[in-house]
């Protein structure tokens, strides 16, 4: 089972917020997921980004591949830098 770290769209029309989830790569965007590891709200000023670093590190270590957007959010939160440091 290939796992992905990606965003799940929530909220109302024209007022989205996103949950950062770990899901099977074949699951639909807003469908079944394994675990929620954070959330992102781009509509607030400043943008709200909250990621559980422990869960994110666990899933990255087990081989979950982040999507492009999820990767940029993980980089912004500093999780990817910590992950690469722990691999050395």
Image: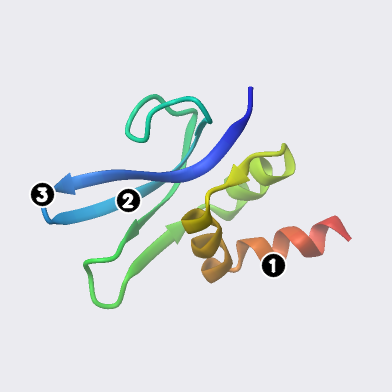
- Residue at mark 1: 81
- Label 1 element class: helix
Q: Position of residue 12 (x, y in %)?
A: 12, 47
- Residue at mark 3: 13
Residue sitting at 24 percent across and 77 percent down? 45
Which comes sooner in the sequence, label 2 or label 3?
A: 3
Label 2 neighbourhood size at 10 Å, few (<14), some (14-19), many (20+)?
Answer: some
- Label 2 element class: strand
Which comes sooner in the sequence, label 2 or label 1?
A: 2
- Label 3 element class: loop
Q: In the shown orientation, is residue 82 left or right of residue 47? A: right
Q: Residue furthest left?
A: 13
Q: Position of residue 24 (x, y in %)?
A: 53, 27
Q: Residue furthest right?
A: 88
Towards the viewer: 30 or 45: 30
Q: Quadrant of residue 64?
A: top right
- Residue at mark 2: 18
The quadrant of the rendering that contains the C terminus is bottom right
* Label 2 to label 1: alpha-carbon separation: 22 Å
Q: Position of residue 27 (x, y in %)?
A: 44, 25
In the displayed structure, would residue 22 be above or below residue 18?
A: above
Q: In the shown orientation, is residue 51 left or right of residue 53? A: left
Label 1 neighbourhood size at 10 Å, few (<14), some (14-19), many (20+)?
Answer: few
């Amino acid at each position: 089972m290939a796992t992905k770290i990606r965003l799940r769209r929530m909220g109302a029309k024209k007022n989205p917020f996103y949950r950062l989830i770990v899901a099977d790569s074949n699951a639909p965007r807003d469908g079944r997921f394994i675990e929620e590891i954070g959330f992102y709200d781009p509509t607030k000023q400043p943008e709200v980004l909250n990621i559980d670093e422990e869960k994110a590190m666990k899933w990255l270590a087990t081989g979950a591949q982040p999507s492009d957007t999820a990767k940029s959010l993980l980089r912004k939160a500093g999780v990817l830098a910590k992950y690469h440091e722990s691999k050395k």
